[in-house]
Amino acid sequence: MLELFTYDFMQRSLLAAALVGALCSTIGVFVVLRGLAFMGAGTAHAAFAGVALGYLMGWPPLLMAILFGLATVWITGWVEEKGRMKLDVSIGILYTATMALAILFIGLMKTYNAEVYGYLFGNVLAVTSEELRTIAGLSIVVIGAIVLFSKELYFIAFDQEMAEASGVPARRIFFLLLTLVALTVVISLKTVGAILVFAMILIPASTAYQLTHSLSTLTWYSVLIGITCSVGGVLISSYWDIPSGPAIVLLATLFFFASVVLSPKRQHRALASS
Amino acid sequence: MASQSSPIIHFDHATFGFPGVVALDDISLEIQSGEFVGVIGPNGSGKTTLCRAVLGLMAPLKGHLKIFDCACDELRCHHRARIGYLPQKGVVDRNFPVTVLETVMMGRYGTLGLFARPAGKDRKIALDALAHVGMEGHRDSALGHLSGGQQQRVFIARALAQQPDVLLLDEPTTGLDITTQHNVVELVQHLHEELSLTVLLITHDINMIRSRVDRLVLLKTRLYAAGPPADVLKPDILSQVYGKDLVITEKGLVIVEDYHHHH
């Protein structure tokens, strides 16, 4: 197994997986706590539609993914703020509409394009050096923004109105969070794919949520679980020759169920009800 | 008690609501620094709208509202940080992963402003705030593990950590048992006296606060009365607002007349 580490492609994959794992699990803390779980799924499909349009028109797919992702989160954020519609309804509409666009764009392509499907299912083992540099650069931007605004992000996740009333520019921070979610989804598309990126945002933070009562501990646990699952998933995938995306997500799911069983919160609830 | 300086909150014929819906109509009211004011009124009388207005979350449709000598729609974040706010008791998710000290530290965030990291000084302010509400022994407890009364104390400490000039409490005793209600209101009175805080307390429980506040404000979309409790709590005024015959007992308690007859 150790010889795996000597291959260039393997080193790139492990690094990409670790970066995406860290990134998704960090933003995931705020997504889970702020109740934006469905937003991740909606954004991923929107970003995929952007990729498909990019390939159809010969435009840069990553840039198109960013544009589609940002448009989706900003529209849903605006709709929630105006209170016109429940957030899950507006995301549901955009989610399916963008998926319809993606299918339309793929249908309009004259030939079968395997690369587009790569974005749908992800393949971390195929990450190129150039893609790795893009992932690293964007990861630094997103994690830097999270670190810089962590106290405000925690506060709006806890209670946005209370944050606003206490003098935190909560509205702007909420839109920053949405923007960071969109960027995270786009960065992760190539590695875990549009279908599974949502799981990478959701599962590590939800697993950590079972294990602690402290916000700061939750964040560290989430990052640790995210990196472990991503790197572990890549190793499993190359060792047993199975697709990397499912290997990462299924390993994370295993961690999640173990945390539910071992959760001190669950034990506390059992004590409280006895 | 009320000082003669300029009012800290000044409603001048202010009307609030949404297009087509008036929640508060033509309110004129001054609240002086250091006052303890109780705001009462039936459900839907505009109490929470008043609260949101004072927080600068709603601008008047007509008239003016000045807070700290600043028009409320021009309130900046640093002004808001001077108002410690306890929202209506929502259901705290028992599993929300936050400790008592982390909750109280959030009170520092608005005051600190963007980019600044909380330092040892902020931690000390948060711990002092916890000591003020008698919860210093619970600083590492999970917020969700506390009783309703303890959670309210923690949220009051969070407001105190802002080192506010005004404490704004929206129905702080809702959902608490009678002893705990009493303890929470007693704590608020104690903080008002000890820290010379201006307190604006919105409540349904007239009897709990009538002997503690400097002034009562009685709302039902309009401002029906404002003044010392003895001047506001008059059966004719109360019946007009609450739509039922309310009486004041020998001990000064406000009760519904049916109840009075049968007992």
Image (cartoon, coloured by chain):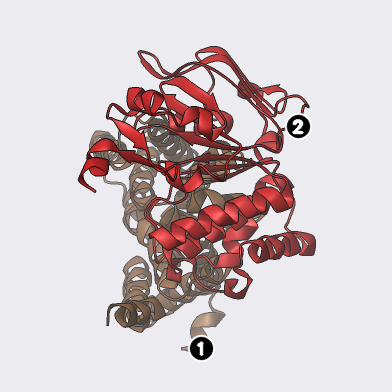
Relative to A128, does residue A222 appear above or below in the rendering?
below
Quarter of the figure that contains the N terminus of chain B: top right
Q: What residue type is labelled 2?
A: Ser
Which label number is shown at residue B3? 2
- At label 1, the amino acid type is Leu
**Element carrying mark 2:** loop
Pick the front one: B156 or A81? B156
Please tell me which residue lies in front, B125 or A223.
Answer: B125
- Look at chain A in the picture and name its colour: brown
Q: Position of residue A10 (x, y in %)?
A: 50, 73
Residue located farthest toward the bottom when viewing the structure as drawn: A1
Indicate the quadrant where residue A201 lies.
bottom left
Visible residue check, residue B227:
yes
Please provide percent x and percent y for residue B161.
67, 54
Q: What chain is colored red? A: B
Residue shown at 49% from the left, 53% from the top: A158
Checking the image for residue A2, the label placed there is 1
x 52%, y 61%: residue: A26
Give left or right: position of A130 versus B240: right
Q: Could you tell me which chain the residue with mark 1 belongs to?
A: A
Q: Say the numbered circle drawn on residue B173.
A: none
